[in-house]
Each structure stands twice: as C-alpha cells, then as structure tokens.
Image (tube, rainbow, N blue to C red):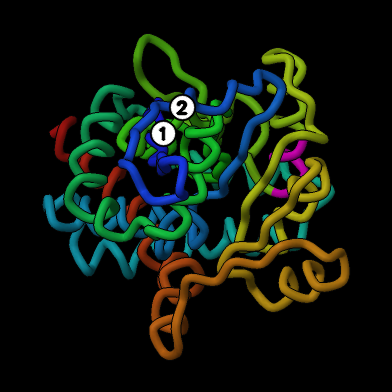
Amino acid sequence: MARIRKLTVSTDAQGHTAGWAETELAPPAPDPCAAAFFDVDNTMMQGASIYWFARGLAARKYFTSTDLARFAWQQLRFRVLAREHAGDMSQAKDAALAFIEGWRVDDVERLSEEIFDELMAPRIWAGTRQLAQRHLDAGQRVWLVSAAPVEIGRVIAARLGLTGAIGTVAEVLDGAYTGRLAGDLMHGPAKADAVTQLAAVEGLDLTRCAAYSDSANDLPLLSAVGRAVAVNPDGTLLRQARQHGWEVRDFRTGRRAVRIAVPSTAAAGVVAGAVTAGLALHRRRRSS
C-alpha cells in the first residue's frame, strides 16, 4: 500500500517562512471487516465480458458468421428463461452452460487471459477502477461479482489487482466441464446470497461494505450492504437509487453511453450465443 507524504511549513519567530519539511504518514489502518463488491458488465467494464470473450474467440476462428446465425438462438433462449422463470431457474441453468461440455478448464483460462489483454483491458472504466482502488488503499478487500463464468472473473480481478471474483461456477470432472452448473447462476438474488456467505467466511460486516452495479437485477446485492452505489445505472436502478438516496456515478457521456450499452443487451445476446457455436464447432474439430 502506498504511503502518504505531507508537506509542512516551518516559520521563524516573526512568522516568516523558514523552510519546508516533508513527513511520511502511515496509510489508513486496514479494516478487516469491510470490503467492496463490484459487478463487471457495464460497471467495471464497458459492455459485457462475455461479448468481448466471444469477439476474441471469433478473431481466433473458433466460429464463423454462419455458426453465429445457427446458434445465437440458444443465448436468446437463456435470456428469456432467466427473465421469465426468476423463481425457477432450472430451465435457464440447462441453457446456460450446456455449450461448454467437454472443454478443458485450462483452455478457457488461457483464452480468458489472452482476450482480456487484447479486448477487455482497454474497456475498463477508469472511474470505476479508481473507486476500487480507493477501497484497496483503505486496506479493504475488493471482489468482482458477475454472472459471467468465474474463470473470466478471476482473470479480470487478477489483472486489476483485486482480491478475487465470484461468478457462475461450472461443474468440472477430470479437468473438463460437464456442461452442468455446480451451483446457482450468479444472477439476481444469487449474488446477494454469495456475498452473504463470503462475508460469513471472511468475517466481514456487510453494514460496513459497499456494492457497485449498473443494473436493477442487482438490487438484492445493493440492498445487502451498508453502502450502495449505482454506476452507469439503467433507468430502473437510477429510479431506485434516487428513492433510496444511494450514490450515483455515471462515467458515460452523451451518444457514447448509448453505444456502449449495446453489447450488454441485444448484441451481447447474439454474440454470446456465438460462444455456444464456437465451442461446439471447436469440439467437433477436435474430435474429427
């Protein structure tokens, strides 16, 4: 943790400046009971992480535009199920990770690292990164909390120097994905549940913790902590933030805000569906 330097002025008996002295102050004492939790898509990063992951796969010829058209409906199906079956996510779970069956975990981790460096790093919001750094400088831990696969979240957290990541966890057998979830989708109330469980394990006091998100889907998470911050909020979250008196940070400006919102909605649904196509195509090529 960086130390703070302070300049003080010394004066003589007549009150004239006699010189400057530099003293080094100790940083704030770490607060082991406080932490910050950041959503990823459109909060820490412009657009959706799965969108940029898919773009990286496309650049590596893991799928073609024809595959994209054939398989995009699978992601659309997942999005519809996730929205319409908020109380019963079993169907959405089946649609979420079936496409990764047979893929090696180390392959996904390697690709995530490469694609982060190429496509995601330039799209990290500088303002949100500074908010996270403030918590780190205050001796607090900082976790990402994302519906994206936890492997992607861990790479982003490691690259940004954060404590760690919470994300959707896929079942793994002998180093390969089975295509099933190991738990719940890290979406909506599941984020709040995961953070509550983490707090119990890590000895955190959630009333002293902060959470940051752009989406009304994360209202359970934002409501679970003592300090909620709406970052680049959607309309529903902005209304809720105003109603509850939550802090609002918006790093978007004008038409650019409209453009960057696209990857997290329609385009993300289409291109993330291409991940399904790409992984299926890759499996076919590996087995042929």
Report x, y in % for residue 182: 59, 24
In-front residue for pair 286/160 = 160
The answer to whether any part of residue 283 appears in the image is no
What residue is rendered at 41% in x and 43% in y? 9
Magenta stretch: includes residue 248: no
Calculate the distance from the C-alpha at mark 2 to the C-alpha at mark 1.
5 Å
Taking the spot 72% from the left edge, 36% from the top edge, the residue there is 209
Q: Amino acid at mark 1?
A: Ile
Residue 25 - label = 2
Q: Which residues are magenta?
A: 188-192
As helix, strand or loop, the secondary structure at mark 2 comes to: strand
Image quadrant holding the N terminus, namely top left
Q: Residue sitting at 45 percent across and 18 percent down?
A: 172
Q: Is residue 189 magenta?
A: yes
What residue is shown with label 1? 4
**Callout 2 environment at 10 Å: few (<14), some (14 to 19), or many (20+)?**
few
Disc 1 crowd, CA 10 A, few/some/many (<14, 14-19, 20+): few
Where's residue 179, x and y in %?
A: 47, 31
Determine whether 94 is above or below 142 in the image. Answer: below
Please identify the residue farthest to the top as the structure is shown: 174
* Residue 18 seen in this snapshot: yes
- Please state if 286 lies on the left or on the right of 277 as rendered: left
Q: Amino acid at mark 2?
A: Leu
Horizontal and vertical percent position of residue 126: 37, 58
The image quadrant of residue 45 is: bottom left
